[in-house]
Image: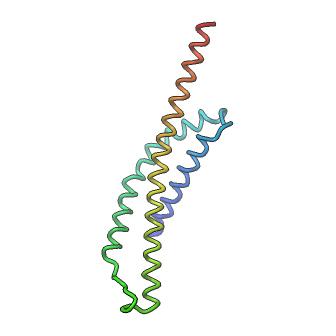
């Protein structure tokens, strides 16, 4: 099941890169293309939300069915395996949170950039009418 975590990691990374490119100053020439690409990718990236909830349920199920390991009832190897499993679950939960937060930020930033572009175009039209 490691492939789904790789896919989620790449999706979160792509979202972060798109947010970074949309918010960097000085990319005005590329901004229209970036906006078009980002707006077209928002709907496919929406599939990340149910995917994250599925993975969150997987983490919860693994947590509930995991055998408990107290210090006295486990060998050192079992204790280390138990701790490693807990660390992986926490890392995966952070990855889920990052993917969801980056999607929300990407959606919000894209909406704001589109509004700014529309207002700039409106301002330019108003300036040309008054001249």
Number of numbered callouts drawn: 0
Q: Residue at x 65, y 33 (%)?
A: 28
Name the image quarter holding the C terminus.
Answer: top right
Does 126 appear above or below 12? above
Residue drawn at 36 percent across, 54 percent down: 50
Residue 30 image-quadrant placement: top right
Tell me where residue 58 appears, x and y as whole percent.
36, 67
Q: How is the image coloured?
A: rainbow
Q: Quadrant of the N terminus?
A: bottom left
Q: Nearer the viewer, residue 119 or 17?
A: 119
Q: Residue furthest front?
A: 71
| Closer to the camera in the image, 23 or 43 | 23
Quadrant assignment, res 69: bottom left
Please give the name of the residue rendered at 45% of the width and 80% of the height, measured from the top-left corner.
83
- Residue 94, above or below 114: below
Residue 27 placement, left or right of 37 = right
């Amino acid at each position: 099941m490691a492939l789904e975590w790789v896919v989620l990691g790449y999706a979160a990374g792509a979202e972060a890169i798109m947010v970074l490119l949309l918010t960097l100053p000085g990319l005005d020439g590329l901004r229209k293309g970036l906006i078009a690409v980002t707006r077209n990718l928002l709907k496919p990236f929406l599939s990340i939300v149910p995917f994250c909830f599925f993975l969150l349920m997987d983490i919860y199920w693994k947590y509930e069915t995991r055998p408990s390991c107290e210090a006295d009832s486990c060998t050192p190897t079992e204790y280390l395996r138990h701790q490693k499993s807990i660390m992986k679950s926490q890392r995966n939960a952070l990855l889920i949170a990052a993917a969801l937060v980056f999607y929300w930020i990407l959606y919000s930033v894209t909406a704001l950039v589109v509004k700014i572009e529309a207002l700039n175009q409106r301002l330019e039209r108003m300036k040309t009418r008054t001249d």
